[in-house]
Image: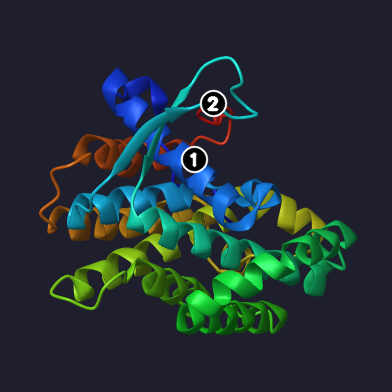
């Protein structure tokens, strides 16, 4: 359910794309140093956006350097890291572990079970650092699973759970920005749940799998889904515009107003990793 919050590379300035890669590679590097090489397989775009947004808001001191890695052995890559990178790395592992467990419980996917066992020690470490958030993520994912198994037709009930999950993740500090960050996380979480369901509508209908949009009694389900997605994206962008963001605002705007909108085009396939 992750990987939707990405850039539109073609509309970014070179400097902006270079910076985005720096944050992305910084997260990858931090995963390796903190949790080992295998944890880098959990890397996703959504956590890079979290780092960008929180770094722009709080402007922590960045550690910037160039380094080679196994993916780029020939040329050194820009690495940008700060205290939020460390926070996002732990979240990345927690989310990935619970997703794998969820896949095993729901589908008896042995690959997911094996991957979760590999990630288990790393999960325990990250979960001990972010105990309350880890428990919230677990609880919200369990609620989603329960609602889906009940075959609920209440699309808000099930999407709200993922919204509340993301809400906790965006609350880096309890300060003057708490309410705004909660709303940003909430609307983004609902959007991610909706876009994932929107993409799988036809497949889930054929497989007789749960999909909230297939439970709705409307004439044009796809149009209904698109309107709901645009509503949540509008609410999300409105909340982001309330924050005093200057640093990397161009990248954030690219993601919100262009990058994730590409998912509306089901024929779009150019979601390449920034390497």
Give the structural element (helix, strand or loop) at label 1.
Answer: helix
Q: Residues within 10 Å of mark 2 (few under 14, many from 20)?
A: few
Tell me, for residue 68, which label it has, or none. 2
Q: Is residue 46 left or right of residue 150?
A: left
SS class of the residue under badge 2? loop
The reply to whether residue 198 is in sight is no
Tell me where residue 231 appears, x and y as whole percent.
32, 58
Q: Residues within 10 Å of mark 1 (few under 14, many from 20)?
A: some
Q: Furthest residue to the top? A: 74
Horizontally, residue 161 falls left or right of residue 7, namely right
Please tell me which residue is depicted at 33% across the width and 51% down the height of the picture. Answer: 82
Image location (x, y in percent) of residue 7 = 40, 35
From where the camera sits, is residue 124 visible?
A: yes
Q: Earlier in the sequence, mark 2 or mark 1?
A: 2
Marks 2 and 1 sit apart, C-alpha to C-alpha, by 32 Å
Front residue of this view, candidates 15 and 141: 15
Task: Compare residues 86 and 232 and report the one nearer the observer.
Answer: 86
User: Which residue is pictured at 67% across the width and 47% down the height?
Assistant: 37
Q: Between tags 2 and 1, which lies in front?
A: 2
Q: Which residue has dot 1 on it?
A: 263
Task: Write down the quadrant of residue 21 in the picture.
Answer: top left
Asked if the residues shown at circle 2 and circle 1 are in contact, with their CB atoms under 8 angstroms apart, the answer is no
């Amino acid at each position: 359910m992750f990987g939707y919050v990405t850039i539109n590379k073609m509309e970014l300035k070179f400097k902006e794309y270079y910076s985005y890669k720096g944050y992305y590679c910084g997260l990858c590097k931090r995963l390796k140093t903190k949790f080992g090489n295998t944890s880098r397989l959990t890397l996703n775009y959504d956590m890079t956006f979290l780092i960008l947004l929180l770094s722009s808001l709080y402007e922590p001191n960045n550690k910037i350097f160039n380094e080679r890695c196994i993916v780029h052995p020939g040329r050194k890559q820009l690495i940008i890291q700060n205290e939020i990178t460390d926070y996002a790395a732990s979240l990345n592992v927690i989310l990935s572990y619970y997703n794998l467990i969820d896949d095993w419980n729901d589908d008896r996917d042995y690959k997911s079970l094996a991957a979760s066992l590999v990630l288990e020690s790393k999960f325990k470490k990250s979960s001990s650092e972010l105990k309350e958030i880890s428990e919230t993520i677990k609880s919200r994912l369990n609620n989603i699973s329960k609602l889906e198994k009940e075959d609920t037709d209440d699309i808000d009930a099930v999407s709200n759970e993922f919204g509340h999950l993301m809400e906790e993740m965006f609350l880096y500090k309890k300060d003057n920005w708490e309410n705004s960050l909660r709303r940003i996380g909430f609307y983004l979480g609902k959007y991610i749940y909706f876009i994932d369901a929107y993409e799988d509508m036809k497949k889930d209908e054929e497989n007789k799998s749960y999909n909230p949009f297939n439970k709705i009694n409307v004439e044009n389900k796809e149009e209904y889904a698109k309107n709901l997605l645009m509503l949540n994206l509008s609410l999300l962008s409105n909340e982001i515009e309330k924050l005093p963001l200057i640093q990397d605002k161009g990248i954030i705007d690219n993601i919100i107003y262009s990058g994730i909108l590409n998912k509306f085009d089901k024929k779009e396939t150019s979601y390449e990793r920034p390497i």
